[in-house]
Image (tube, rainbow, N blue to C red):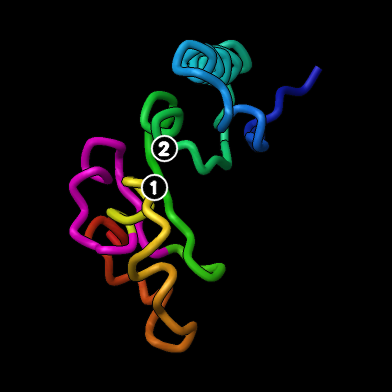
Amino acid sequence: MTRASLTLGGMGPAPVRAGEVERALIGEVIRDIGERLETTMVTITHDMQVAFRVADRIAMLDRGKIIAEAPPEEFKQLSDARVQQFIRGEAEGPLSDQPAEDGAGSGEASGFGR
């Protein structure tokens, strides 16, 4: 039997509505699956608390391009206003204000392009 070297997964809206205990459990399950399968897990989520719990590295996309990438603790400290808006879950800010042609996805956020 051949093992997968990469496993993809996404988290739909139900986990976003889940309470803290359920979200923590989801994170533990995701990490446990990766360890048991001895595989790289790619999880797509808008829930930053789950992402911070399960990820070895976090990448953020804006308009289809990676704008930031770093380990969780470093990701939290990135100075890019778009990253900070997303972490805080704010509706208003550079992500909602910026037109597509103003450099989104330039990779200029610290932590990306190393």
SS for callout 2: helix
Asked if residue 21 is positioned above or below residue 8 in the image, the reply reads: above
Residue drawn 34% across and 46% down? 87
Q: Which of 97 and 60 is in front in this view?
A: 97
Residue 103: which quarter of the image? bottom left
> Which residue type carries mark 2?
Met
| Residue 47, image x, y percentages | 48, 36
Residue drawn 56% across and 18% down? 26
**Mark 1 → mark 2, Cα distance in angstroms:** 9 Å
SS for callout 1: loop
- Residue tagged by mark 2? 48
Instruction: Determine the residue located farthest toward the bottom in the rendered image.
Output: 101
Magenta region:
67-82
| Residue 78, image x, y percentages | 21, 53
Residue drawn 57% across and 38% down? 42
User: In the visual, does 59 lie left or right of 15?
Assistant: left
Q: Are marks 1 and 2 in contact (CB under 8 Å)?
A: yes
User: In the visual, does 74 lie left or right of 39?
Assistant: left
- Residue tagged by mark 1? 89
Mark 1 or mark 2: name the one nearer the start of the chain.
2
Residue drawn 63% across and 32% down? 5
Q: Magenta stretch containing residue 53, yes or no?
A: no
Q: Nearer the viewer, mark 1 or mark 2?
A: 1
User: In the visual, does 18 lie left or right of 95?
Assistant: right
| Residue 16, image x, y percentages | 56, 32
Instruction: Determine the residue located farthest toward the right in the rendered image.
Output: 1
Q: In which quarter of the image is the C terminus?
A: bottom left
Which label was assigned to residue 50?
Answer: none
